[in-house]
Image (cartoon, helix red, strand yellow):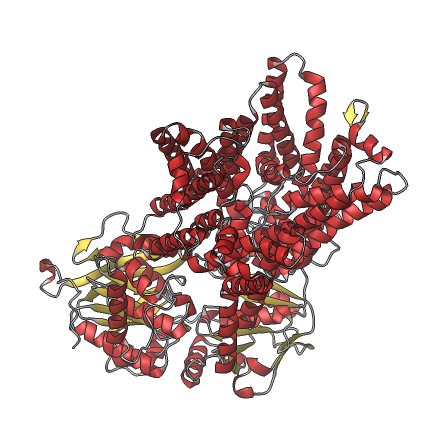
Amino acid sequence: MSALARQRWIWAAAGTLLLWLALTLVSDRASLSSLVGISRSAAFLALVALGQMFVVTTGRGNIDLSVASVVTLSAFVTLTISAGSDARLPLAIGAALATGAVTGAINAFLVLKARIAAMIATLSVGYVLATATLLMNRQVRSFEIAPTLRFVATERVAGVPIVALVAILAIALSAWLLNRTIWGMRLCAIGQNLDAARLAGIRTDATIAAAFIASGCLSALSGLLLSAYVGGAFLDMGRPYLLQSIGAVVLGGSLIFGGASTAIGTAFGALLLALIVTVMQVAGLPAGAQDVTQGAIIIAVLAASGLAARAGVRRG
Amino acid sequence: MVSDPQRAPLPQHAKPPAALVTLDAVTVRYGATTAVDDVTLAVAAGDIVGLVGANGAGKSTLMRVLSGMTAPGDGSLKIAGLAVPVGYGPRQAHLSGIRTVWQELSLCANLTVAENFYVEQPDIAGPVWRRSYAERARAALKATFPDARTDPDRLVGRLPIAERQMVEIARAASAPGLRLLILDEPTSSLDATASRQLRDRVRALAASGVAVIFITHKLTEIIDVANRAVVMRNGRKVADTDARSLTETELIAMMGAAEGAAAATPRDAAGEGRTLVRLGGSWIAGGGAPVALAAGSVVGVAGLEGSGQAQLLRSVLDGATDARRDGSAAFVSGDRARDGIFALFDVLTNISIGRITRRAALSRLSYSAEAAAARPLCDRVRLDPDRLGSPITDLSGGNQQKALVARALAADADILLLDDPTRGVDIATKQHLYGVIRETARSGKLVLWHSTEDREFAECDRVLVMSAGRVHSDLGPTETGEEAILAAAFHARATDAAPSGQRPGVAMAKTVAANALRNAAIVALVAILAVMMLRNPMVASEFGLRLLLGPAVALILVAYAQMFVVGGSQIDLGVGAFAGLVNVLAVTALYASPLLGLAAIGVALAGYAAMALGIVVARIPAIVVTLGASFIWYGTGYMILPAPGGTAPDWLRALTAWHIPGVPTPLILILLATAVAVAIHRSRTGTVLRGMGGNEAVMARSGWSVTRYTVLRYLIAGSFAATAGLSIAAASGAGDINAGGTYTLLSVAAVVLGGCQLLGGAIRPLGVAAGAVTLALIGALLGSLGVSTDYNAAVQGLLMIAVLGLGSVVIARGDG
């Protein structure tokens, strides 16, 4: 499996490199400053996408549609609780991450115990979170950001945005979990064949629940950093992350039907999507055309891999 | 004799009773196994052939060749004296008048009985086709089962298993142009009367010139109905005689291993270890004494196929109350693809997964340590250790099975559960696995071994013979020969009563609960309207309803679009954005020129239908295609109209601005949309679309093109979504690309609330209408109760969770 996965992320990496080269050739002022911006927006996306990846790995078409609501809600939770003070920051971070973890646990409960299809369960939970966000929106008194959080979200260390470092850490941790721990092996096994996993003695429910909880926590982390970066929170701030997180996972070479995922690939998928957006901005494409291009690229990549898989089956 | 006017006359060249179908020296191999070995068989018109044989004798494979599901490796198949063309498949078999009733039923559970007749026999023309097919279904059922009272308009999925089997048999037996009817275990869930009626029908069919092949384990039925008995053993035809003079004993003797019974491996006396498994309660026939299974022995689990052997092993694995287990257990599956291998893993990972189940989740996984642990296991099962790094799917079936056995050995469990582990495995590997099994038992483990090859029980110390889910006999070491087991199995089958149904009280309560949940949306809608009218009687006025229902019109249209997609077991996450795009086109292009506008909407619709090609041809999951496409719809709309604005054409506004005194216009629009949806749903096309959602493979076998109907499905859905976009423009007079956004998720919610199944193609237009209106009214309800509309979304979400959660509870109870 590792051999297969290792091969697939190459495409996202190659795409990233090509686009970056194109960007540097097209525009003189692109290079460094735009790269910093790209890595920052890619970092926010990568965090959400890694969580999405864990849920997708559990297989049978499982997808977490609540990520967008979690991003938004955790931004509001962070703002409301920290209220611009460093002293209250640990509490705020704890509360934001707990929001994500509880959401993930509820999703897992609905999927595993109430046996609701993951898509519908996470969709419904997203609705409930939307109301929670509306209610919090009325509570927000100020959009002041705790200084430490603002520093982490906006500053750079040796030219690299700190959020990018956070994302790299999360990527490394996810890659380790997926490839080097028993849990990762179980997760991939479940995604390939739930029955076989159960018969092999794997405690499937606990493993799947962990994936949903990880997704909730990572989205919450992204939301809390995002609130500090944009300097506030607004109702639809998480929305773009829904499609983009799924896009990053499949562009990175993880299988949409589960069972084989790559954290590095997901990271490159996020970087690629962020780059595409930047290239389109630099090229002066109107906002609508940027959306069209993103949608078309995701469909094209999947169609290519689908057709290739089909040809492979015919050859075999 | 029942004459059947629908049957086409036999072709002229078949006049001399030449064989209808001829199998000539047919051989079928699956990997290393030869399932059918050099079989020659001719069946003439009017023949009733009883085909018998022990488990795995090759009967079903032979029938798969006849019905075009499996191509013979060697030999040939002739129909009416002509060799079948290359590419003979299920469709050609159908056209040649060959119909098969398989053990696993092939009806579409989400269609009614009459609709199932239509998709298989779409020959009746005319507008009253539903009534014609209901009549045909009723007549067909009556022709075979005179007592049948099955309502042709009931969904097949709601019929008890016996009635489903009767429908399937009746459908095959009444097929126009039927020439050969193959019945594979047709009476397994029928009671004695229905079984006798079926045999009468078989005789009548034969008298009218149809050939029948009848496979069953109930040998008395063969002796009763067949005029020829064909006996198979180990893939070969060993006897082909007149059936009428045979006795059961003679048949069993022919099926058994009279010749060359493999000498059992010499073995030590079974060690008297401690008891590891205790079977009791419902597992023992006639409430007999519990069976204790001790360490150090190999225990076979025998019986005719599907007598509960696999379930017994799984109960032991799960440690169920009646199958108490005192020690750890490891499982080896014989159905490798279904529940054995992890197809994306390499061989090493497939083996070591057995070792890691008891370790902590975050403990480190070391490939070298796993490889070191796997090597001795490879030696034990004789798997080349150099192949540990290969993908498991590169291995032959036999080697895959060795890896699965190695996985179970890696777990080092006290109990080894083998679920037909040598299925499709070559003889050398088999012999070696027998040795491994004995060794494992000798090392103090208990081996519980289910096999579909009765010969293998010679390797066991003890054999439990099962029938109808219970252990009937417990054979000792001297009785584990094939013949003794066959006799015990057939004896057990004969003493078993017909399968008993569920207790009526429980079934009734379950049906009521399930019906209430299916109609949850209607219940909720009535409740909401009642509450609102109580708080404010103005709600019931024409004006009140117009105000309340206005916003529901677009939602209902989008929900119908979603419903037709869900009917194909798919989901559309871009449907709202598409409605938004059409909304934008309506206030720009359509305003500028009706012709240009209609062309633009047509192009958009074509793009929408093109998604179907991505789904069918490129195999992209619908959820991702539609999500990606949603960006295309949104982006295109945004480019055309970046900010809300534009003007809807006057004629479009006029379409919805009319008013009949006393009747709220939105109500009429809603009823109109519902009428269209119901009409499509119930039309021939709608029936085929639902059939595809329920059982695509069966529909394809009946000759329906999956690609064509998927494109059609998306065209229908797209048209509803486009109408929704137009209705938004008509209602607001302006356009906004964001107008459709919220409808996507709401449409999914409406469909789910309306009682549609996300998988399986079961959809309900009236439920969807009620679901959509309910969702649209929740805001108004909260307002009338004095609750902030902030809670709108939460109530919608919780309503969905409640309905679906309760639904699974009811279904789960039903399983138990």
Q: Position of residue B671 (x, y in %)?
A: 40, 55
Q: Nearer the viewer, residue B245 or B135?
A: B135
Q: Residue at x 50, y 62 (%)?
A: B422
Which quadrant holds the N terminus of chain B? Answer: bottom left
* Residue B481 point in image, percent of width and height: 46, 76
Q: Residue furthest top?
A: A28
Going 73% across and 53% down the picture, which residue do you hit? Answer: A102
Q: Is residue B225 left or right of residue A86?
A: left
Task: Locate residue A103 relative to residue B426 in the image: left or right.
Answer: right
Q: For this rendering, which residue is in front, B581 or A295?
A: B581
- Looking at the image, residue A123 sits to the left or right of residue B194; the answer is right
Q: Is residue A273 visible?
A: yes
Q: Nearer the viewer, residue B310 or B408?
A: B310
Q: Residue furthest right?
A: A87
Judge whether B23 appears above or below A80 on screen: below
Residue drawn at x 23%, y 57% as measured from the top left: B127
**Looking at the rendering, in which quadrant would you find the C terminus of chain B?**
bottom right
From the top left corner, tell me how far across and down residue B434 is, in percent: 54, 65
Q: Nearer the viewer, residue B525 or B811?
A: B525
